[in-house]
Amino acid sequence: MKDFKRYMVTSALPYANGPVHLGHIAGVYLPSDIYVRYLRLMKKDVLWVCGSDEHGVPITLKAKKEGKSPQDIVDRYHNIIKKAFEDFGISTDIYSRTTSEMHYKTAQEFFKTLNDKGVFSKKTSKQFFDPEEKMFLADRYLSGTCPHCDHEGAYGDQCENCGTSLNAEDLKNPVSQLSGATPELRETEHWYLPLDEYEPFLKKWILEDHKEWKNTVSGQCRSWFEIGLQPRAVSRDLNWGVPLPVENSEGKVMYVWFDAPIGYISATREHTADWEKYWKDEDTKLVHFIGKDNIVFHSIIFPVMLKAEGSYILPDNVPANQFLNLEGDKISTSRNWAVWLHEYLEEFKGKQDELRYVLAANMPEAKDNDFRWKDYQDKINNELVAVLGNFVNRALVLTQKYYDNIVPECDCTPEDDAIFEQIKTAQQKISDKIEHFRFRDALKEMMDVARLGNKYLADTEPWKLIKTNPERVKTIMNVALQTVASLSVLAEPFLPFTTKRLQKMLNIDAPGWTNAGAKNIMVPGHQTAKAELLFEKVEDEVVEQQVRKLLKTKENNKASEKPQVTPMKKEITFEDFLKSDIRVGVIKSAEKVKKTKKLLAVEVDTGVDTRTVISGIAEHYTPEEIIGKRVVILINLAPKKMRGIESAGMILMGEDADGKLTFISPEDDFHAGATIS
RNA sequence: UGCGGGUUAGUGUAGUCGGUCAACACGCAGGACUCAUGAUCCUGAGACCGUGGGUUCGAGUCCCACACCCGCUACCA
């Protein structure tokens, strides 16, 4: 492997429309922090940057909804996130933001360079423009009448009723979701990054030159290659973002995904005048820590931008993690199903390392993992307290008892030497694992050193020997103290707050990484401070309270989910209504349509005949349980073939706000074919 | 539906090139110890490695099919 002179580490910029939660921490910021702290201990030249991503449409919408400016919104969350990171020991060299002056400058220079080099292609297309908001509308902020089925709630990109994907311009009676105004079709021109031209380069670079990347990352890239890369628009018609630095581009800003990764560069520039060596020198190792949702941006789009610019290096690795679930359910900002970092820090004062430990031990490195409060309690009580905290306490308390906190002399036997050997080996293993982004394994290795210490004490039994061979006990306690001191280095990347306290107790300066396993970190005659417990047990009550809090969130969600009532559709005439032939039908049989998740093929006796209807209810009903059910069915609907089966008619279903479906059934046992009007 | 990832003891996970690979942690059972936050140490029980085929002298490990879970995508008359 190449020997790099320095490291440039970036972590995905958190989007400033909400605070960060444990999923963000476990997936991105904690692994980065462990990695960087380790590199610093190795005395490497390393720079770690991060910052808030503050552009993009969702922020403008949130601002509008709250009657504030986009800047107000991003200020609020930027400050919450920044403070939470600091308090949690996320030790970035700089935490910047993409609304900074330096970022505008850097992003514009970058864009201009690409533009001057003729990298971009330009294309004109027609898009809807909201005259009230004075802005172009992204497809999903448009609604209207579907040109195919006349459904009125169709979105600009798709009709949810008939399922066809649409071109926004084909929508009938389009309405802006933002203002309710009728948008006009206007021509607009956009800049495109020709990803397709870089495909051969990317394929070689990722699939051949970087085989060491996680297979989730290369797998994702491979799937993009299979579809074929397309030019990607990097400009938007919006008034919130970095303005394009080119002529005739009024009202246009950079696509948020174009400017955000440049934020890494801007932050570096803001931090040091010497920024270029971190971004443009081949001897620098560039590493992007991200979550799996960001893979294409960091392994395809941003590298193409860097490559096209010409003077930048490309990432050496993109260690993407999977997602963390919470108590079995997907974390969701909008449903408030999350443990927010800033709230944890409020409620668990001084317990940063406890959380860091649990998250690191449970990091979603290869697949999605689950955070459970019970597991939080178990890991802290049975591992942190019982193994690490206990060993440290035993060593220090014994030293206090026997030697009044003075480090005794050491006269090592081969058994003692073996301990130092093992610590050395562990140190190398931890290094190796961290360098390969295997943080949970690395953490385990570190804990094994504490286990080794516990075993050493159990084997040598100084509390017995003190009566028969006090000379020997001196050496034993010396070895135990050296082990504790080694732990104060080896644990630093994972548990920085604890190691600081530990070093204070030992009354030593922070040793360097390579000192771990040395015999002389604690010099004989040195005076240590009084022993304190490193960790407290987590009581059942604490965990129960958190679980209750989450349950409450669930209940609140249910309650506050005011049935989202869809607006009334356009008035129809009685004659229109009479056109539909709605009947009571009886379900004769049903079976799942193969290879689909939601579709059931249902045989219905309509009185008129028995016919097959495809219904999208398989997630709510099993075929067995609906046989014999009386349902309401629209029978004169034009048949449509789906998945090779012809569906003649439509079973009417009630739909809840959260998407739950239920049959509409007559209250009395009406016969099949009874009309409904 | 397409693509990607996953499916290994009660739980969470390791298993790089196919041959001590069935491992580690927690939990559980029994024992030892008492310096330590009822912590620690030792011993033990617990997995036919999602299912079914195939390649091979030999497969969690390679190939094929299927099932289930997650993400994106499609579909949901």
Image (cartoon, coloured by chain):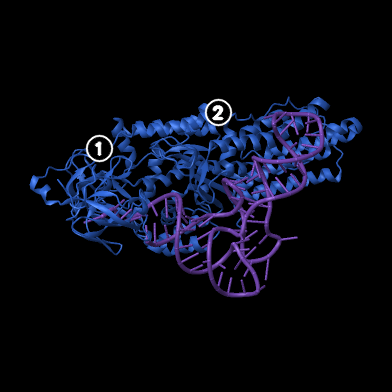
Which residue carries the number 2 mark?
A542
Quarter in which the N terminus of chain A is drawn: bottom right
Asked whether residue A629 is in view, the answer is yes
- In the picture, measured across the screen, residue A413 lies left or right of residue A601, that is right
Q: Chain A drawn in what color?
A: blue
Looking at the rendered structure, whether the residues under marks 2 and 1 are on a common chain is answered as yes
Residue in the image at 52% along x and 48% along y: A277
Q: Amino acid at mark 1?
A: Val
Asked if disc 2 and disc 1 are in contact, CB closer than 8 Å, the reply is: no
Q: Is residue A526 visible?
A: no
Where is residue A180 shown, x and y percent of the image? 19, 39
Q: Position of residue B61 (x, y in %)?
A: 58, 64
Q: Please give the chain letter of the residue carrying mark 2.
A: A
Quadrant housing residue A131? top left
Label 1 chain ID = A
Viewer-proximal residue among A18 and A562: A562
Taking A603 as reference, is A664 above or below it?
Answer: above
Q: Whole-percent x and y of residue A181?
A: 18, 40
B45 relative position to A150: left or right: right
Q: Earlier in the sequence, mark 2 or mark 1?
A: 2
Question: Which shade is chain B?
Answer: purple
Which residue is the extreme one toward the right?
A468
Q: Residue at x 8, y 48 (%)?
A: A575
Q: Above or below — where is A79 with respect to A228?
A: above
Please give the label number shown on residue A565: 1
A113 and A192: which is toward the camera: A192
